[in-house]
Amino acid sequence: MYLIKKKRVLCPSIFLMDVEAPRVAQYCQPGQFIIVRIDDQGERIPLTICDYDRDAGTITIVVQTIGASTKRMMDLQEGDSFHDFVGPLGKPSELITDDIDSIKDKKILFVAGGLGTAPVYPQVKWLHEHGIDADVIVGAKTKDLVILEDEMSAVAGNLYITTDDGSYGREGMVTKVIDDLVTNEGKHYDLCVSIGPMIMMKFCCLTTKKYEIPTIVSMNPIMVDGTGMCGACRLTVGDEVKFACIDGPEFDGFKVNFDEAMGRMRLYKTQEGEALLALEEGKTHHGGCGNCGGDK
């Protein structure tokens, strides 16, 4: 059992938890994710690691209440426990694994949309701890949905908050802020990391491509099973079939076929749609795990 050490409501539909998981905390890196189950009958839910404390042996997760399982998670309190807490899974951020000296020479921009602020934070924090300050754009629909502002402010070089309705910070989408920073404020960036809703990442990539800024995206929003067995996070990257959970979750945003991925995500929500995709995609529908039969 994995004890919930701390719980904090960030806004009406989003909450944060520190969970006691020493083995995960010992080995995890920014960009990776975990899978939780509330009980032995519970749904497997993949969640990106928001933060970790190796000394305390805790992992921080941020969850948005969407369906029945996340509503049950919302009802858990400090002192309750998760039945399963598996990880770290997925590959760490490229920024963590690349040569640190080459990273120090780059001007980096992070673009976080909504809940995407949670997986952006540990990467920005890691860079800050290594003497690298990155610019960060955090976008939300309204002021009430802006999360982790204080935490991000403490580690970002410059933090730009924008809301769709202009109720806080700048007004408009994150893409408008990118345009403003590059065109009107003379900013130059060598790399962009964009994490958030699929549609946001798509248009972020279209914007950064105009300015020839290489862009990394995290495809964690389309993960379901988290092990390559369900096929939900199958996507096309360039001319290759990839799976967000085992090959990612980060990919070259300019190569991701967002329209295909979003279409599959919508279709995969129904049993009939899942069966149709399995029929059409054959052995490439699954991740070749060797257990589910999808690679036979």
Image (cartoon, rainbow, N blue to C red):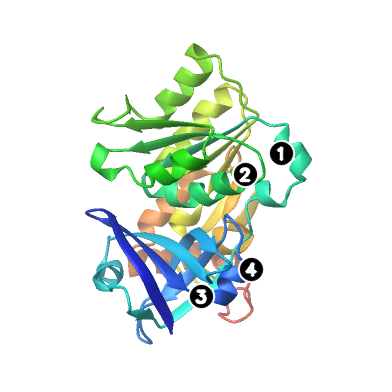
Residue found at the very far bottom of the displayed protein: 40
Indicate which disc, 4 or 1, sits on the residue closer to the N terminus.
4
In this view, the residue in front, 235 or 201, is 201
Residue visible at 64% across and 68% down in the picture: 27
- How far apart marks 3 and 4 lie (CA) works out to 11 Å
Q: Name the residue under label 1.
A: 103
Is disc 1 placed on a helix, strand or loop? helix
- How far apart marks 2 and 3 lie (CA) works out to 24 Å
Q: Mark 4 points at which residue?
A: 27
How packed mark 3 is, by other alpha carbons closer than 10 Å (few <14, some 14-19, many 20 or more), is many
Residue type beneath disc 1: Ile
Q: Mark 2 points at which residue?
A: 127
Q: Name the residue under label 3.
A: 21
Indicate which disc, 3 or 4, sits on the residue closer to the N terminus.
3
> Label for residue 138?
none
Marks 2 and 1: in contact by CB < 8 Å? Answer: yes
How packed mark 2 is, by other alpha carbons closer than 10 Å (few <14, some 14-19, many 20 or more), is many
How packed mark 4 is, by other alpha carbons closer than 10 Å (few <14, some 14-19, many 20 or more), is few
Q: Where residue 51 appears, x then y in whole percent?
A: 50, 58
Pick the quarter of the image with the N terminus: bottom left
- How far apart marks 2 and 4 lie (CA) works out to 18 Å
Is disc 2 placed on a helix, strand or loop? helix
Residue visible at 28% across and 73% down in the picture: 77
